[in-house]
Amino acid sequence: MSHTRAELPEPVDSERIPLKARKVSFSWEDTPLHWVPGEPFATHTINVLHLLLPAGERWFVHVYKQVLPYIRDERLREDVIGFIGQEAMHAQAHDEVLPHLRELGLDPTPYTAQVDWLFEKLLGDRTLPPGKARKWWLMERVAIIAAIEHYTAFLGNWVLNAEELDRRGADPTMLDLLRWHGAEEVEHRSVAFELFLHVDGGYRRRARTWATAFTALVFLWQRGARFFMENDPTLTAGRASFKDFHRAGKAGVLPSTGDMLRSIPRYLSRAYHPSQEGSTAQAVAYLAASPAATAAEKATKGVAEKATDAAAERGVA
């Protein structure tokens, strides 16, 4: 499907920023099972991120490495490479939460096995002949990622502004993980959509793959929340329902139902562009203050300074 310049959504240029991966690390020894005090449902609904994201973001990286040869714009190529680095780090950081959950008596393996199957088999590479069929499947996955990234940016913007979690005394380490990740999702929120526009951009494909992504996310999220609630060793009758989600959203410890619903027509609008949502300035400000991100920055500078000193010593010798 072809587009004239006037038909394409316009980005907000001031919202673009060079992307870099931050090699963060977190210590989970002091994080309780219900890290939002008194809110096991909200805790476990957010915990589903730790189950979905490692496999999902590794899949993003895999697909984007395949699409790199189709990118004809050097600035976009730089953005995609930065995106790949950030997503790989996100997958690693969330993966490292899972052993802590097992130590607390909640083994997520039965659920993560299903998620792995979804991304590796159902959405993975298929044995297709070279040419149109293989390219079609690649473009479908690029479009699905753009739709998913609409929601990761939505969640990132939400958690950066979820002051109720602070008021409830949520665990600071988990909040830093979520807000570091959320800030980077806001930081790179335009990349997936701009890549989709660059390599395809068809509106019918955008709408169709949005429906696929949204349905899959809702199904997987409610299934994950139910899994956590039913297997939580501290709950005698754990359950998860839409009523619980709506209540937690009204309380401010989860995104509100209304905000989630209003996000749908925004993505499906022909004038949609991700840079019009969220704030890069807010994301950058959080990353400049995040304990994990600032520690990663110091460590990176330390390694660079040692390398420079070593090179200087070799030059003198």
Image (cartoon, rainbow, N blue to C red):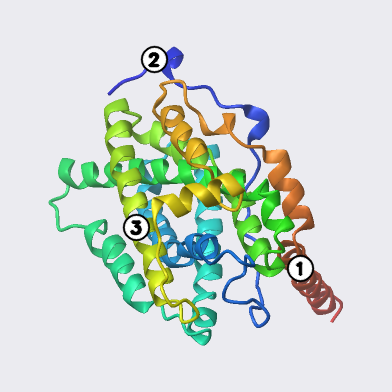
Instruction: Select label 3 or label 1 by which is in front.
Output: 3
Q: Amino acid at mark 2?
A: Thr
Q: Is residue 128 visible?
A: yes
Image location of residue 183, percent across then percent down? 64, 50
- The residue that mark 2 highlights is 4
Q: Which quarter of the image is occupied by the N terminus?
A: top left
Q: Quadrant of residue 176?
A: bottom right
Please tell me whether mark 3 or mark 2 is closer to you in this view. 3
Residues at marks 3 and 2 touching, judged by CB atoms closer than 8 Å:
no
Residue 233 is situated, as x and y percent measured from the top left of the image, at 46, 82
Residue at 26% x, 59% y is 124
* Kind of element beneath mark 3: helix
Of pointers 2 and 1, the one earlier in the residue sequence: 2
Question: Does the rendering let one see residue 78?
Answer: no
Q: Residues within 10 Å of mark 2 (few under 14, many from 20)?
A: few
Going from N to C along the chain, the mark reached first, 3 or 2, is 2
Q: Which mark is residue 42?
A: none
Q: Position of residue 292 (x, y in %)?
A: 71, 66
Name the residue tied to disc 3. 220
Residue under the point 35% across and 29% down? 201
> Which marked residue is nearer to the observer: mark 2 or mark 1?
1
Q: Residue furthest right?
A: 316
Q: Earlier in the sequence, mark 3 or mark 1?
A: 3
Q: Quadrant of the C terminus?
A: bottom right
> Which amino acid type corresponds to the residue marked 3 in the rendered image?
Leu
Dividing the picture into quadrants, the one containing residue 90 is bottom right
* Mark 3 → mark 1, Cα distance in angstroms: 33 Å
Mark-to-mark CA distance, 3 and 2:
37 Å
The percent coordinates of residue 271 (x first, y second) are 46, 21
Residue beneath label 1, please? 295
Residue, x 62% and y 77% (percent of image)? 32
Q: Residue at x 60, y 45 (%)?
A: 158
